Amino acid sequence: MPAADDKERQEGRGRLSSIDLLPEDAEPDLIWAHEQLRDRAMHSNVIHSEFNARLADRGIGPISKSAWGRYAVRKAMQFRKIDATRAIASELAPTLGTDGSDHVTMLIAEMVKVAAFQMLEEGPMGTKGLMELARAVATATGAQKTSAENRRQLEAEVAQRLKDTADAVAKVGAQAGVGAETLRKITNLLTTGQA
């Protein structure tokens, strides 16, 4: 009977590819390959050839065309998702107003919840995967709550400061002989933004 760790590994992403198994020495070359795939300036076959040449310079064996192809497709899909997420965020950010960070926090938390639901729909998960998923959802939910609480606290502090400022202006204005109507307009501007 397989050990619990073996079972979770089998339920996870499966066998590691030859690229995943490259030694640490290949890290700079892997970063280079990622940058080239991301830039999309060179064809994947050219990147593959240069990548293998770089590995050979380090005394590391070549990566097969099929392993490279699977890897390049997987990275392209990841880059597209990242680009789509960035595009959505950049479109949404201007419409969120001054409390945009709260909305972004809530949006991300909802995205984490949806991703968790999709992962659960895809099939059974090991206990480790379920624990990590539960932590991610709990963290996202906590971030939503904290963000909303921080916003309410900040709004209350700003409102109190504006009221204190308006009171101080009214007091100084009265001592200086400023008319009641002018003081009322100043106070309204401070507290509501309107005269």
Image (spheres, rainbow, N blue to C red):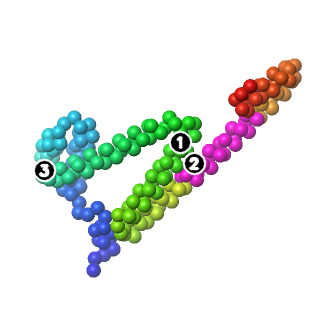
Front one among 129 and 93: 93
Q: Kindly identify the amino acid type of the residue bearing the numbered disc 2.
A: Ser
User: Pointer 1: what residue?
Assistant: 101
Using the numbered discs, state the Cα–Cα distance from disc 3 to disc 2 in whole angstroms.
48 Å
Q: Observer-nearest residue: 135 or 79?
A: 79
Q: Amino acid at mark 1?
A: Ser
Residue 35 seen from this side:
no
Q: Which mark is residue 147?
A: 2
Mark 2 crowdedness (10 Å alpha carbons): few <14, some 14-19, many ≥20: some
Q: Is residue 163 rendered to the left or right of residue 127?
A: right
Residue 168 placement: quadrant: top right
Residues in magenta, as a range: 143-163
Q: Give the secondary structure at mark 1.
A: helix
x 42%, y 41%: residue: 88
Which amino acid, by three-letter code, is at mark 3?
Lys
Q: Does the magenta run of residues contain 47?
A: no
Q: Which of 174 and 103 lies nearest the eye of the viewer? A: 103
x then y, percent, for residue 4? 33, 74
Label 3 near label 1: C-beta < 8 Å? no
